[in-house]
Amino acid sequence: MTKRSIFSRLGAALLVTSSFAAAQQAHAARHAAPVLEGVPHYDNIIVIEMENRQYGEIIGADPASSPHMTELARTYNSATSYYGITHPSEPNYIAMMAGDQEGVLDDDGWYCQADGTPLPAERAIVAGKPDAAPMNRPCNGIKKNKAYVAHHFTVPNFFAQLNKAGISWSMYSQSMPTNPQTGESMPEMPTYPASDDTTADVRGLYASKHNPSVNFDDIREAADFHAHNRGEKAFFNDLAAGRLPRFAYFVPDQCHDDHGPSGPMNDHPECKGHGYGPSPLLTTGDNYVQTLVHHIQASPQWKSKKNVAIVVTFDEDDSGGAGVQGCCGYHPVAPGQPHKGVVNQGGGRIPTLVITNHGVRGVQDDTPYNHYSLLRTMEDAFGIAGHIGHANDGTAAQPADGSFVQTPVVPMVRMFALAAH
């Protein structure tokens, strides 16, 4: 054997040993990460946010409306007492990322000011410069009500927590508009411009009210705002390449999220809904969730030793016959009181599933949870000490009249527990 071959083999052996040692150190470092409140460390969390359905409309519905999500609930982990924060959509998205709905009680644009008028163009800052996109939806909401507030604010938020901790993140929005000249994402657009004939068939699919990154001034105004907002194609490409950021927030469009679109797409065969019960709209949403989960579970990150969790949840129920339902932290309005108010009236009992690659399975958890509970859990899972907003409500505020019993905001420990190995 020549000296060269000996040294070549020795070098290869050292390289293998070094690589193995590095992998072992990385594995040990992950598992040595502080466990906060009993929630294990997670490398990746993917949230898939659906829309406007009660728990019983989706999970175990008879006749079946969403068989794929029902099967996922049975195979993996289902929170059977999970609630939205309020109605309608936008304040729920804000609440999940800020721990507070920040006084927002409607679906008005992020650019709406407290006096019910849009921000002047020179003050509507997006990615470091005045926004060129038309603010083409009026600020209607409840501006005659003294509770009307600005829909953009500088407050603590989960995106900022991730930035401070050096944790990568992206908002992925299906059917999000893009700049036809540059190809750059335009998440700040409330709707497609009516004059844009090339997008007439998809107008009404994307909704900025379902993208909370636009509401936080520090996030929207940052130079990297567009880089953090990506579309469906980027999501699937990132999955296949194993480069999904540690926090991925995926929002289907309104034909695929069980909501239903407005405009010309409302009559599309796959987007038609007819209230409670099975419909083409619910079938489309159920199939899409299955597609997303399938692609995630086929990804390199899912198949690795890293801890990965998929959370499938809804923003709120459909404001139907279930009545006022909420939990956790600060109390909903008393039964019989108006649904619109400065306090949380509850967003209804909604489906929430947690699917993990190395976690326990088959958990049916009836602990009361809401979006603040999920926020608190994600903070813990990423090792972020300290909770923002109502995610920090470890003690429940009880209504003075004793009309119902409130529960504290607690982390979703059982849902995210790792399997013994």
Image: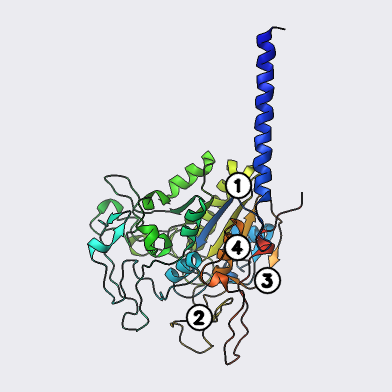
Identity, as a three-letter code, of the amino acid under mark 2: Gln
According to the picture, the residue beneath numbered tag 2 turns out to be: 345
Residue count near mark 4 (Cα–Cα under 10 Å), binned few <14, some 14–19, many ≥20: many
Give the residue drawn at x 57%, y 87%: 399
Q: In this figure, which residue is indicated by the disc labeled 4?
A: 377
Which label's residue is closer to the chain start, 4 or 1? Answer: 1
Instruction: Identify which residue, 175 or 169, lies in the foreground.
Output: 169
Q: Residues within 10 Å of mark 2 (few under 14, many from 20)?
A: many
Mark-to-mark CA distance, 2 and 1:
37 Å
Q: Residue at x 26, y 63 (%)?
A: 123
Mark 4 and mark 3 in contact? Answer it, CB < 8 Å: no
Query: From the viewer's perspective, is the residue at label 4 or at label 3 nearer?
Result: 4
Depth check, front residue: 272 or 295: 295
Q: CA distance from mark 4 to mark 1?
A: 22 Å
Closer to the camera in the image, 195 or 21: 21
Q: Return the residue at label 3.
A: 366
